[in-house]
Image: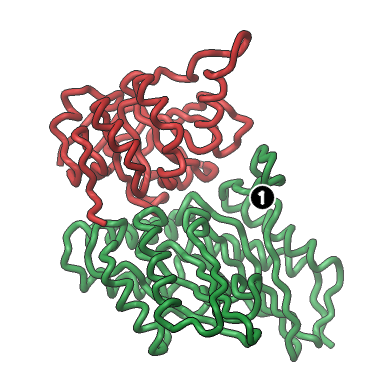
Chain colours: A green, B red
């Protein structure tokens, strides 16, 4: 049995908030640089150049990559051999608040979705999964809402042809146009239930965006490329930097498909204790 | 690249075309969802409520932005644009009141585009998702109204050479082709 103090969790989560918001993911930066080098459309190339330069400034000056430091989503993989001393969930939420304060990030969360009111840091979403072993893995994904707003869920018929699913995803990107900071990264969740498909779509955004693609992912990328939205909506080659699909068993009567759109500033950071 | 000053002059706007790159200097006002809603509510109400906008809107530029907090030693934190479309419902009213320019990201409704043409106004695109980069153009910040809205409060920003692209020009043409 391994023991981890709540204090350690607070500190780790706080550090992850700062890292995720100020240091662009390496896989993403690599991809952006590679599409920058290939881009011929001048306006699109300039837009990509600004995105890369912004990441450099943010990292150097410890500024948030984007002022929308998002709704923090925390993914916890808690090994069953780990014993936490103190209040685990409180520690995670405290870590978020501390990290956001330390980073001078924006207070973007309002307590009551209908009454609204003054925004603050309280209200992060925490997903907890119990795993084997004696490790605790913490991941913070600050999700901006310009792109979260473009997310969609559709419950397809189980007999729906693949093309219908493809059209649904392509049309979701098309209707987002330039509103949600393209080039986009698409997280797609297929299967499970309505809520679980949405969760899978978010989890998909944590995958390495340069990892080997499936045939379906490649196919979708090609179709979305034909939309020619491009960086900041200025056309050019790249509308979508990557598509990541997560699937799960589902019911004989259904085929849930959820799409979670991310802007070009896809941010996340992980640590294992 | 053209340099223009805010508050805007009609002459400067008329020569700009969708897709032109400009460097904007001068004063601009941040306002996003809740600030827009409140500006209109305050004006729409009857006796006893303030019937004025919290700043002089004549030829003014509104920046759809809610900045991050200001780190020590900096003028402002990360301060990129938010999605303009959400402000479309409020825009006709402000254009009628004299608003001349808007800065944001993404497309606008057809209604707004037609009104931009009617009032010979202009809509600019700021580098979306590049809040750290943009923060360097902000030289001074002054709170103007609604501090209870936190990051959605109205601020007056003094900017220098804010790099923008004309999204919709005074003729109602859009830079987007989709």
Q: Residue at x 22, y 55 (%)?
A: B177
Residue A68 visible at all = yes
> Residue B154: image x %, image y %?
50, 30
Q: Give the residue at mark 1.
A: A121
Q: Residues within 10 Å of mark 1 (few under 14, many from 20)?
A: many
Which chain is indicated by disc 1?
A
Viewer-proximal residue among B171 and B32: B171
Report the quarter where the C terminus of chain B lies.
Answer: bottom left
Q: Name above or below for residue B127 compared with residue A79.
A: above
Viewer-proximal residue among A156 and A223: A156
Q: Residue at x 34, y 37 (%)?
A: B111
In the rendered structure, the answer to whether residue B126 lies left or right of residue A126 reads: left
Secondary structure state at the residue bearing disc 1: loop
Report the quarter where the N terminus of chain B lies.
Answer: top left
> Residue A246: image x %, image y %?
54, 82
Q: Name above or below for residue B8 compared with residue A45.
A: above
In the rendered structure, the answer to whether residue B114 lies left or right of residue A213 reads: left
> Residue B134: image x %, image y %?
36, 46
> Residue A126: image x %, image y %?
70, 66
In this view, the residue farthest toward the top is B47
Q: Residue at x 62, y 60 (%)?
A: A72
Please give the count of numbered marks on the rendered protein. 1
In the rendered structure, the answer to whether residue B88 lies left or right of residue B167 reads: right
The quadrant holding residue A232 is: bottom left
Residue B74 visible at all = no
Q: Residue at x 38, y 34 (%)?
A: B139
Q: Name above or below for residue B35 compared with residue A29.
A: above
């Amino acid at each position: 049995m391994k023991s981890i103090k709540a204090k350690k969790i607070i500190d780790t989560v706080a550090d992850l908030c700062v890292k995720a918001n100020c240091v662009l993911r390496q896989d993403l930066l690599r991809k952006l640089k590679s599409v920058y080098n290939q881009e011929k459309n001048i306006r699109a190339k300039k837009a990509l150049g600004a995105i890369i330069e912004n990441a450099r400034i943010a990292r150097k000056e410890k500024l948030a990559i984007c002022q929308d430091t998002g709704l923090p989503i925390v993914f916890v993989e808690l090994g069953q051999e780990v014993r936490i001393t103190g209040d685990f969930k409180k520690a995670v939420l405290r870590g978020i608040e501390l990290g956001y304060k330390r980073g001078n990030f924006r207070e973007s969360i309002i307590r009551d979705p209908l009454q609204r009111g003054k925004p603050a840091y309280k209200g992060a979403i925490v997903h907890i999964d119990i795993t084997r072993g004696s490790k605790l893995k913490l991941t913070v994904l600050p999700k901006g809402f310009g792109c979260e707003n473009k997310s969609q869920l559709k419950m397809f018929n189980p007999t729906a042809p693949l093309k219908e699913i493809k059209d649904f995803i392509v049309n979701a990107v098309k209707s987002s146009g330039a509103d949600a900071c393209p080039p986009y990264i698409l997280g797609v969740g297929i299967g499970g239930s309505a809520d679980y498909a949405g969760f899978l779509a978010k989890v998909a955004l944590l995958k390495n965006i340069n990892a080997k693609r499936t045939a379906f992912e490649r196919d979708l990328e090609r179709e979305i490329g034909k939309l020619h939205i491009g960086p900041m909506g200025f056309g050019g080659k790249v509308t979508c930097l990557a598509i990541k699909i997560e699937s799960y068993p589902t019911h004989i009567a259904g085929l849930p498909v959820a799409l979670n759109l991310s802007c070009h500033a896809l941010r996340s950071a992980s640590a294992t204790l | 690249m053209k340099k223009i000053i805010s508050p805007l002059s009609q002459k400067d706007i008329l020569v700009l075309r969708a897709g032109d790159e400009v460097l904007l200097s001068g004063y601009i006002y941040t306002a996003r969802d809740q600030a827009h809603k409140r500006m209109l509510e305050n004006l729409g109400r009857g006796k006893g409520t303030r019937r004025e906008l919290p700043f002089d809107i004549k030829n003014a530029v509104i920046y759809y932005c809610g900045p991050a907090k200001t780190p020590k030693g900096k003028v402002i934190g990360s301060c990129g644009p938010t999605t303009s479309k959400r402000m479309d419902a409020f825009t006709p009213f402000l254009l009628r009141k004299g608003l001349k320019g808007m800065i944001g990201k993404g497309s606008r409704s057809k209604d707004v585009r037609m009104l931009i043409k009617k009032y010979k106004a202009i809509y600019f695109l700021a580098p979306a998702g590049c809040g750290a980069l943009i923060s360097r153009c902000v030289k001074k910040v002054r709170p103007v109204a609604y501090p209870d809205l936190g990051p959605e409060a109205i601020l007056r920003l003094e900017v220098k050479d804010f790099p923008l692209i004309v999204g919709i020009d005074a003729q109602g043409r859009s830079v987007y082709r989709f």
